[in-house]
Amino acid sequence: MGIQINIGDHTSSVTRYVTVPASRRSVLHWARSQAKAIAKGNPKANKYFKGLSGGRTLTQLTNDSSIWINYYPGLTLFGEAEIGGKELALGPNSFSKGKWVVLGTLIHELAHINGAPTGNDTQAEEALYHCGLGTEEEWLDGIDDPSTPYDPGSGG
């Protein structure tokens, strides 16, 4: 099965993380499927994730059924996760930007679960580029292309 979506069958250890609303689930199912497809078809993504301090590939993360995707209704950011933990949450802002941002947020938060630091560090956001969710121009020039979920200057 792999990474799980909280549909009411899980109580998160993070009290502010709750069941993903039914209206958000189809987009989240799509994003989870896309993350698994990236892991399977993009060796660059697995290599990047393996190099993070957690040392796991994206394939290992997406296949880990102890990782839970939750919802955090009061979150003003797109998502959050505990570094090295098993719980992540997406907030309303990621869903309001569309399915590609939901996918990008999921990848970003999985990078945190795999050890990418928060704050001004950009390793979690750089995971998007290595997963094919950003352009080479963004990567090299650091200028955001709003048509991709990757934001080259974004930390967190």
Image: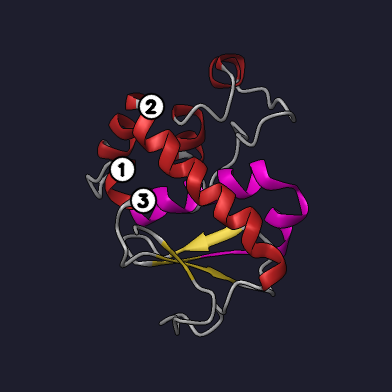
Instruction: Give neighbour class at mark 3: few <14, some 14-19, many 20+ (Cα, 10 Å).
Output: many
Residue at screen point 61% across, 23% down: 142
Identify the residue under disc 1: 59
Q: Is residue 149 visible?
A: yes
For badge 1, the amino acid type reads Thr
Please give the label number shown on residue 62.
Answer: 3
Report the residue at 35% width, 67% height from top. Answer: 86
Main secondary structure found in the magenta portion: helix
Residue located 38% across and 48% down the image: 116
Q: Nearer the viewer, residue 26 or 82?
A: 26
x and y, in percent, of residue 22 in the image: 67, 71
Compare residues 46 and 117 and report the one nearer the observer. Answer: 46
What label does residue 38 carry, if any? Answer: none
Amino acid carrying mark 3 in the image:
Thr
Tell me: residue 86, above or below residue 47: below
Q: Residue 5: image x %, image y %? A: 49, 66
> 85 above or below 28?
below
- The residue wearing badge 2 is 42
**Earlier residue among tags 3 and 2:** 2
| Residue 45 seen from this side | no
Q: Which residues are magenta?
A: 89-117
Label 1 crowding class (10 Å Cα cut-off): few <14, some 14-19, many 20+? many
Secondary structure beneath dot 2 equals loop
